Amino acid sequence: MKSLAGAFFAAVNLLYAALFGGPIDGTAWDVKVKEEGFFHWTSRQETLIFHGGKVAIAGEVARGYSPALYESKNEEGGTAFSLVLNGDGRDPVEWSGRVEGERIAGFMVVRARDGRTLRYQFSGARKNG
């Protein structure tokens, strides 16, 4: 019964995001993405654009992923969000994070088909202009 209620609320949340967007809809964010671990010193820049209940991530779109529906909810002092990017034959990419004021931070997880899991951290600020 508990999982049925959870599934119902998740479906309602997705429907809301698809129809009306969420609390962070209409915003764009510049973030720096860095793989977790001591020996990973490089990073890359990404832009996350939340619009119409979906999020487009510039670098992921260039890699062949389509904009995806996202879930968001207001939490004390901020907004939590999550999404999963899927592409034709591509590894699923899970993004989850939190927006507080003009700052954004979270994690990205790539679950490769060969069983590897790559974890990245991201952080940044609201895009100007």
Image: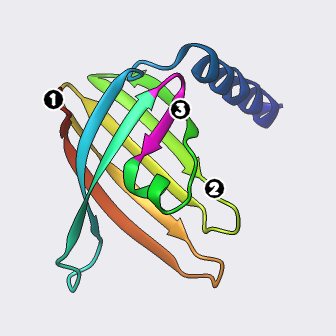
Mark 3–mark 2 Cα distance, whole angstroms, equals 13 Å
Quarter of the image where the C terminus is located: top left
Q: Which residue is mark 3?
A: 54
Dominant SS in magenta = strand
Depth check: give the residue in front, 100 or 44: 44
- Label 3, secondary structure: give it: strand
Residue 20 is drawn in which quadrant?
top right
Depth check: give the residue in front, 83 or 127: 127
Q: Which residue is mark 2?
A: 86
Q: Which residue is mark 1?
A: 128
Mark 3–mark 1 Cα distance, whole angstroms, equals 20 Å
Which region is colored magenta? 51-57
From the viewer's perspective, tell me whether residue 51 is left or right of residue 7. Answer: left
Depth check: give the residue in front, 90 or 78: 90
Q: Position of residue 83 (x, y in %)?
A: 53, 44
Residue at the limit of the structure toward the top, as seen here: 20
Q: Position of residue 95 (x, y in %)?
A: 46, 50
Q: Residue at x 62, y 82 (%)?
A: 115
Q: Residues within 10 Å of mark 2 (few under 14, many from 20)?
A: some
Q: Residue at x 45, y 58 (%)?
A: 62
Quarter of the image where the N terminus is located: top right
Q: Are marks 2 and 1 in contact (CB under 8 Å)?
A: no
